[in-house]
Amino acid sequence: MAPGIPAAMERPHFIGIGGAGMSGIAKILAQRGAKVAGSDAKESGTAEALRALGATVHIGHAAGHLADDASCVVVSSAIRADNPELLRAAELSVPVVHRSDALASLMGGLRAIAVAGTHGKTTTTSMLAVALTELNLDPSYAIGGDLAGPGTNAAHGEGAIFVAEADESDRSFQKYDPEVAIVLNVELDHHANYASMDEIYESFEAFTGKIVPGGTLVIAADQAGAVELTERVRALPSLNVVTYGESETADVRVHKITPRGLTSEVTVVLNGKYLTFTVSVPGRHYALNAVAALAAGVALGVPAHNLASALGKYTGVKRRLQLKGEAAGVQVIDSYAHHPTEMTADLEAMRGAASDARLLVVFQPHLFSRTQELGTEMGQALALADGSVVLDIYPAREDPIPGITSDLIIDAARSAGADVTAVHDKAAVPGTIAGMAKPGDLVLTMGAGDVTDLGPQILDHLSS
C-alpha cells in the first residue's frame, strides 16, 4: 500500500494550483485524503478537476484565500515574493514549501523513477505511467502534461512505484532520491538560472548523486551532453549505469526504427535478444524516449517483453504532436516544442510522417532569456517548414529584456531561407493561416505559451 499523507501536507494551500507541476501534486494529495486548497490566476479545466476531487480552488490571488489553519503553503519558482498569499503566510507563520519538496515527500517509501533531461521528460514519464498501469502495477505518477488517454497529469496509485518528471530548470530535481533515474539529454537551457554548460553538468551530477545506493542511471548513449555526463558519474559508488540508444556500445541498443505513418516500430537488442514493439506516436525522438522507458522499467524488475507490449498502449500527451482536428482538408496539430532541438525534432517527425504535405507553423517564442540566447537557432529550425507565422514572445514569469523581440527569430529564419510572416496580434493568426493553408497541408501550433489556444480557432476559420 502507498504511504499516506505527510503531516505537513494535511491541509496544504497551493499558490498557482492550476500549473502543470503544482496541480499534479495537489491531485495526489487530494486522492490520499488531504484537505487541499489553492488559488490560480484564471478558471480552467484543471481547476474543475481539482474541485471534483474535493479541493477548494480560488480564482485570483488574495490574502484572504489562505485559511488560518493551513499546514503549509506550496509554491513553485514562478511565484513572486510579493504575492499576497505568500505575504499572508509569513504573517501567520505558515511554513512555505517548494513544489519539489512537496513532491519528494509524496515519493517517500516508494520505488521512485525520476525522469530528467532538457527535452522529452513529459513524454517519457507518461509512457512509463501508461505502461505500468497497463500491467496492473497501479503506479503513482506526476507528469508535466495531461495524458491523452486518462486525461490527467497525476494519480495516486496503490502500487509500489512512483514515476515523476524531474525538472532541472530551477535545480529542484536535486531534491529527489530515486531508485532509477533517466537522463534523456543534457543541453544548455533555462538561461535565467544557468550561465554555462558547466553549471548544467554540475546540476545533473548532483541529481545523479541522489540516486539511492544500488540504484540505476538510465542515460542516452548518443547525445553529446549525456555522454559527457556519463563520463563524469561512472565512478560514483554503488551506481549502475545503463546506456541506451543507437550507439554500438549502448547497453540497450536500438537496432532499427521504422516509421509507419503516425507510429513507429522499434527493434532493440536487450541482453543479447531482439525485441520489437510499436510506439504509437511519430518521430525518432519519441521512439528513443520509449526505449529509455523500457530500460528504466527493466531496471525495476519489470519483464522486458511485457513492458514493451504495454508501451504500445501509450497514445500521447496533450500538446506533444497532438492532433487537434481537421477542416477543409487541413490537419491542425499542437506542439509544446520551444527549444531549437525540440522544434527541429517535431518538425522532422512531421516531415517523416507526411512527407508529401506542406508544413505550416505558428510559432510563439517562450521567454525573453531563451530567445536572447537561442533565437538564431529557433529561426534556423523554422527553415524546416514551408511557411511560418511568428508571434511576439510569451513572457511567462519574466520581465522584458530591452532589445529582445521575436524579430531576432524572424531575421534568422529569413537568413536561412525560410518563408516567415510576423503577426503581432494573436487574434489575427487564424485568419492568416486560413488564407495560407490548402487541402492536404499540416498546420503546427508550436510553443510553450498560450499558442495552444489557436488550434480550435484555426479549425473554425478553415471550416467557415
Image (tube, grey):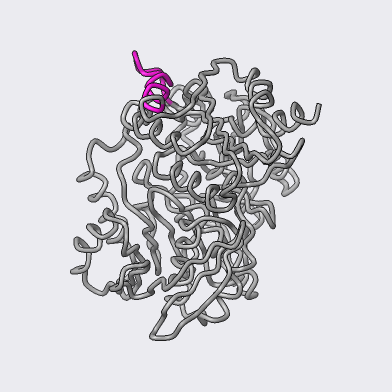
Q: Is residue 135 left or right of residue 81?
A: right
The spot of residue 242 in percent (x, y) is 33, 72
How many numbered marks have been drawn onto this rendered protein structure? 0
Q: Residue furthest front?
A: 356
Name the residue located 51 percent from the left edge and 19 percent from the top edge. Answer: 422
Q: Is residue 440 above or below residue 431?
A: below
Classify 459 as above or below 309. Answer: above
Going 43% across and 53% down the picture, which residue do you hit?
A: 166
**Where residue 396 sits: x, y (%)?**
48, 27
Q: Quadrant of residue 414?
A: top left
Q: Position of residue 446 (x, y in %)?
A: 54, 36
Q: Which quadrant is the N terminus positioned in?
A: bottom right
Query: Which quarter of the rendering shows the C terminus?
Result: top right
Front one among 329 and 35? 329
Q: Residue at x 28, y 72 (%)?
A: 239
Residue nearest the viewer, comparing 293 with 30: 293
Q: Is residue 411 magenta?
A: yes
Q: Is 311 a magenta residue?
A: no
Q: Residue furthest right?
A: 464
Query: On the picture, is 431 further left or further right than 121?
Result: right
Please report the bounds of the magenta region as a residue range: 398-413
**Residue 143 image offset from top left, x and y in percent:** 54, 52
Q: Is residue 103 above or below residue 76?
A: below
Residue 376, quarter of picture: top left
